[in-house]
Image (cartoon, grey):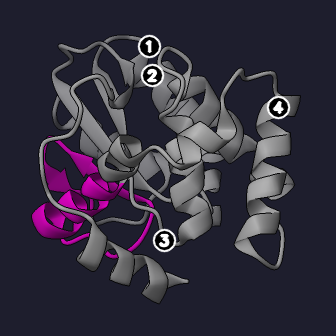
Amino acid sequence: MKKIIIIYILFFVSISSVNAEIKRIISGNQNAKITIIAYESLTCSHCANFHKEVYPQLKKEYIDTGLAKIEFRHFPLDIAALNASKISQCKDGQNLEILERLYSNQQEWVKGKTIEEINNNLKKFIEKEGFKINFDECINNKEIEDFVLNDRIEGSKKFEINATPTIIINNKKFEKSLNYKNLKKSLEKLI
């Protein structure tokens, strides 16, 4: 699968400006002193763990207090993650909620032997959660696809990302073990 997505990126994605209407998934004060960027893949279990174990504390102490904002950027590691990323970008105003539900219920929709089975599980999950999305339209939307894949390309080029999750704090790659204690130490130095 990884080879397929890399080939896809190399041959079919042009690095061009993306439709300005597609917005980044951001939580927190737009003008916060600290900007955290999280490069993630929706099929990555470590990313789901970050959303369950680290993000709630980070949100409570830094994001909700206005000290930091977090931007979730896409770094799909396979076709299933690419499709889930497209779904997470498809409903402006609910993107963060969709992203959070996809991570918190990852095992519910990330199953199947083929991409068709996984897509079917993803579609059922989105419908069960009550999100009003035209699934097929989202999956086939070229502008959203370019937006998602451009995140991956930018992450690879600018920050040399090769694994998920990868955290960037004020444009510097967080190199320590990703847990709340280490993250907090780094953030405290910036306040």
Q: Quote the CA–CA distance across marks 3 and 2.
A: 30 Å
Q: Kindly identify the amino acid type of the residue bearing the numbered disc 2.
A: Glu
Any part of residue 54 in sight = no
Question: In the image shown, does 161 or 127 lie closer to the viewer?
Answer: 127
Left or right: 85 as drawn, with respect to 25: right
Is tag 4's residue or tag 1's residue first in the polypeptide sequence? 1
Q: Quote the CA–CA distance across marks 3 and 4.
A: 24 Å
Q: Say which residue label 3 marks.
A: 77
- In this picture, is 51 found above or below 132? below
Camera-side mark, 2 or 4: 4
Residue found at x 18% / y 38%: 189
Q: Say which residue label 1 marks.
A: 64
Q: Kindly identify the amino acid type of the residue bearing the numbered disc 1.
A: Asp
Residue 71 x %, y % = 33, 35
Q: Kindly identify the amino acid type of the residue bearing the numbered disc 4.
A: Glu
Q: Quote the CA–CA distance across marks 3 and 1.
A: 30 Å
Residue found at x 36% / y 80%: 6
For label 2, the SS is helix
Q: Say which residue label 2 marks.
A: 61
Camera-side mark, 3 or 4: 4
CB under 8 Å between discs 3 and 2: no
Q: Quote the CA–CA distance across marks 4 and 1.
A: 29 Å
